[in-house]
């Protein structure tokens, strides 16, 4: 084993997700999504790209200050590993909303070679060859595929998106627009900050308590009476279950971005000096 491989084995393990390595490129895939046979998908790490400094080395943000050519090459490597054409990419400007947009082949290149959508945190398509992209650096990635109705989606859920139940909004849009049955939907909750690393204050707790979501298992005590540890994975699992997705159809991350800040971009671990991770999903 090389030193890198030894480090990867020790510091970023998973029993729920698949950690793939091709030369220097390391990326994550989700077993249930892979098994359904209807999509190509990937979730990036920091490893295997060409970006430098705080963006090193696999950065997927065209708007965060990195060089365009380097980000483009990063996407070329990441997408190439799973058979996605980078011309198919569709990105949006994420602003922690629960706005979900339906996109088509005509939108390919948005956020890459064409201007980005604004205030959109979720994307859905029922067309093959449309590579939906959402970006992260501690927030929760959500990916969806209905292999029966041939629909896929991805949504970005920080704490605000989680409170506004973007996962359920996404599922409901899949149902209302494309006739999806939630019991057919395969979903994945990707790597995000874990509850041991994510301390929030009372206003955040209050926002969750005032929402319609089930907060069972979502909070535990923090360092004092005004601080709490937030479990974004559990929160989003509760939301997906409430939307009608079967528990057996959900891949659930056991990888923390903050605990593994050497391999994954983490806003909290770096004080905001970082690049972005990308979740990409495309119908075959």
Image (spheres, rainbow, N blue to C red):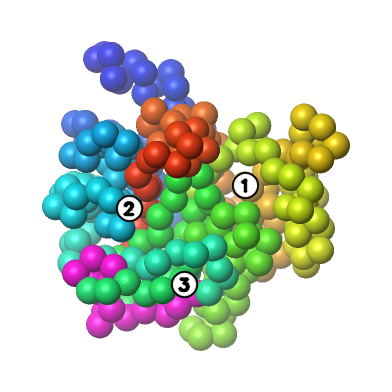
In the drawing, does residue 99 fall left or right of residue 198? Answer: left
Question: On the rendered image, what quadrant is the N terminus found in?
Answer: top left
The residue depicted at 55 percent of the width and 68 percent of the height is 97
Locate residue 82, reporting x and y percent: 25, 51
Which of 260/186 is in front? 260
- According to the picture, the residue beneath numbered tag 1 turns out to be 233
The residue depicted at 52 percent of the width and 29 percent of the height is 259
- According to the picture, the residue beneath numbered tag 2 turns out to be 64
**Which residues are the magenta region?**
100-113
Whether 112 is among the magenta residues is yes
The residue depicted at 78 percent of the width and 67 percent of the height is 212
Which of 12/267 is in front? 267
Whether 247 is among the magenta residues is no
The residue depicted at 53 percent of the width and 50 percent of the height is 139
Q: CA distance from mark 2 to mark 3?
A: 16 Å
**Residue 114 visible in the picture:** yes
Q: Is residue 243 above or below residue 175?
A: above
Q: Is residue 29 above or below residue 261?
A: below
Q: CA distance from mark 1 to mark 3?
A: 23 Å
* Label 3 SS: loop
Q: CA distance from mark 2 to mark 1?
A: 26 Å
């Amino acid at each position: 084993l090389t030193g890198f491989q030894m480090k990867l084995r020790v510091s970023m393990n998973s029993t729920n997700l698949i950690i793939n390595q091709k030369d220097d490129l390391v990326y994550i895939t989700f077993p249930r999504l892979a098994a359904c046979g209807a999509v190509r998908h990937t979730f990036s790490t920091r490893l295997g790209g060409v970006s430098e400094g705080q963006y090193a080395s696999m950065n997927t943000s065209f708007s965060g200050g990195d060089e365009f050519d380097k980000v483009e090459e990063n996407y070329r490597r990441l997408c190439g590993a799973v058979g996605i054409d980078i011309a198919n990419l569709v990105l949006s400007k994420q602003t922690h909303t629960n706005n979900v947009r339906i996109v088509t082949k005509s939108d390919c290149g948005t956020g890459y070679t064409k201007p980005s959508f604004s205030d959109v945190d979720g994307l859905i398509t029922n067309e093959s060859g449309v590579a939906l992209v959402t970006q992260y650096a501690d927030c929760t990635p959500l990916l969806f595929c209905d292999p029966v109705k041939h629909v896929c989606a991805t949504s970005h859920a920080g704490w605000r998106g989680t409170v506004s139940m973007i996962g359920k909004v996404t599922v409901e849009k899949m149902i209302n627009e494309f006739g999806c049955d939630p019991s057919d939907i395969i979903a994945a909750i990707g790597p995000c900050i874990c509850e041991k690393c994510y301390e929030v204050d009372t206003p955040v707790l209050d926002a969750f308590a005032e929402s319609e979501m089930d907060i069972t298992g979502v909070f535990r005590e923090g360092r004092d009476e005004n601080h709490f540890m937030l479990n974004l994975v559990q929160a989003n699992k509760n939301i997906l279950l409430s939307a009608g997705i079967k528990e057996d159809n959900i891949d659930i991350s056991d990888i923390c971005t903050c605990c593994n800040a050497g391999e994954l971009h983490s806003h909290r671990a770096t004080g905001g000096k970082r690049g972005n991770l990308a979740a990409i999903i495309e119908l075959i």
